Amino acid sequence: MISLLDFKRLDFCNINKAGIGMILASWRDIAKTIKTSDVVIEVLDIRDPISTRSKRVEEIANSLNKNLIILLNKADLVPYNIAEKWKEKFTLEGFDTIFYSVWRKKDRKHLLEMLDKYSKGNETFYSLIGYPKTGKSSIINSLKGKKSAPTSPLPGSAGYTKSFTIYKIKNGIYVLDSPGVMPIEGGFPESIIRGKAIDELNDPVRPAVALIEKILKYNPNAFLNSYKINERDPYKILEELAYKRMWIYKKTKEPNIDEAAKAIIRDYHKAKIEFFVYPEENIEMSQE
Ligand SMILES: Nc1nc2c(ncn2[C@@H]2O[C@H](COP(=O)(O)OP(=O)(O)OP(=O)(O)O)[C@@H](O)[C@H]2O)c(=O)[nH]1
Ligand SMILES: [Mg+2]
């Protein structure tokens, strides 16, 4: 039996193994958290669930015989049928799956019902685990119905989660908020754009180009709609955005594409660029 005291006694090290300015959860702490939880809630960004999924988290939970719920967050950013299909995909894999938007009251109701189903009236400890900026802390606030956990729109920006904190949702239901896990598994560019504060990126252009290519693959009009830029070449998009915003080097008169790259990464986090991955393609890929 896990108790509140077990949770409070957890001694987290928050070691930042990536050696970067932003604090991420260490795998040691994640393993400890999973061990001390009754149920793990893995939080994914529904715009791109495969790139924000951690098989390692799932494997640790599985090896410790813990229930794991897949929560597909930010469901307000994708059409309903897309959210349904992603839910179906993860359900077929054997996971209890829910899609969620922190802005929707009915989603809150469904999640609370799901938590009640696991708790069966007993004191139960849930932990929210996921890559940076998937919305873990916002989910806590939506469940509590008030702002209790600090949140932030960008990796490493004021309000991001630096330590493990337990919140009481209601009698007998406790949820632990955790710092983001290292997004390495998400592959490029997700590992870069979620793993570091944007201003700390040495080369923002490379991940921004990969991000632009990914966005264009699923929404060829994304940059036309968001920035009125009618281009499909990532470098031309960066150049045009730099010209439009007057980010131009004084001496050479060249466009500052580093600034444009950072702006696109920021806008992606802030959901200012319309983008989501189609589930069908990924279902076919996983069946190959
Ligand atoms: N559209 C939309 N945005 C959301 C949703 N949930 C969270 N967000 C936004 O996503 C951003 C990140 O939210 P956080 O709750 O700080 O994310 P986190 O996973 O706790 O991030 P870290 O603590 O840095 O790991 C914020 O700008 C939130 O407003 C959602 O359901 N829909
Ligand atoms: Mg947080």
Image: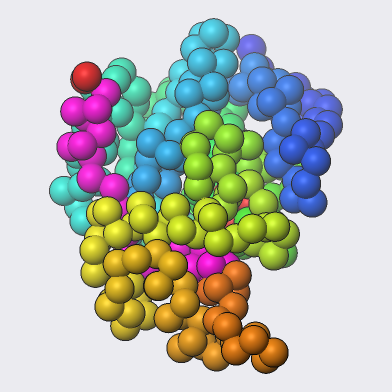
The answer to whether any part of residue 272 appears in the image is no
Q: Residue at x 34, y 26 (%)?
A: 96
| Foreground pick, 177 / 282 | 282
Q: Residue furthest front?
A: 252
Judge whether 100 appears above or below 185 on screen: below
Range drawn in magenta: 261-286
The answer to whether any part of residue 1 appears in the image is yes
Residue 253: name its quadrant.
bottom right
Judge whether 215 appears above or below 27 on screen: below
Q: Give the percent coordinates (x, y) of residue 38.
A: 56, 20
Q: Is residue 10 left or right of residue 121?
A: right
Q: Is residue 88 left or right of residue 153?
A: left
Predominant secondary structure in magenta? helix
Q: Residue at x 49, y 37 (%)?
A: 186
Assign the N terminus to one quadrant of the image: top right
| Foreground pick, 258 / 112 | 258
Q: How is the image coloured?
A: rainbow
Q: Give the percent coordinates (x, y) of residue 264.
A: 48, 68
Residue 265 within the segment the image draws in magenta: yes
Q: Give the percent coordinates (x, y) of residue 225.
A: 28, 77
| Foreground pick, 248 / 121 | 248
Residue 164: name its quadrant.
top right
Assign the C terminus to one quadrant of the image: top left
Residue 96 within the segment the image draws in magenta: no
Q: Give the percent coordinates (x, y) of residue 113.
A: 36, 37
Q: Residue at x 54, y 24 (%)?
A: 57
Q: Residue at x 64, y 17 (%)?
A: 35
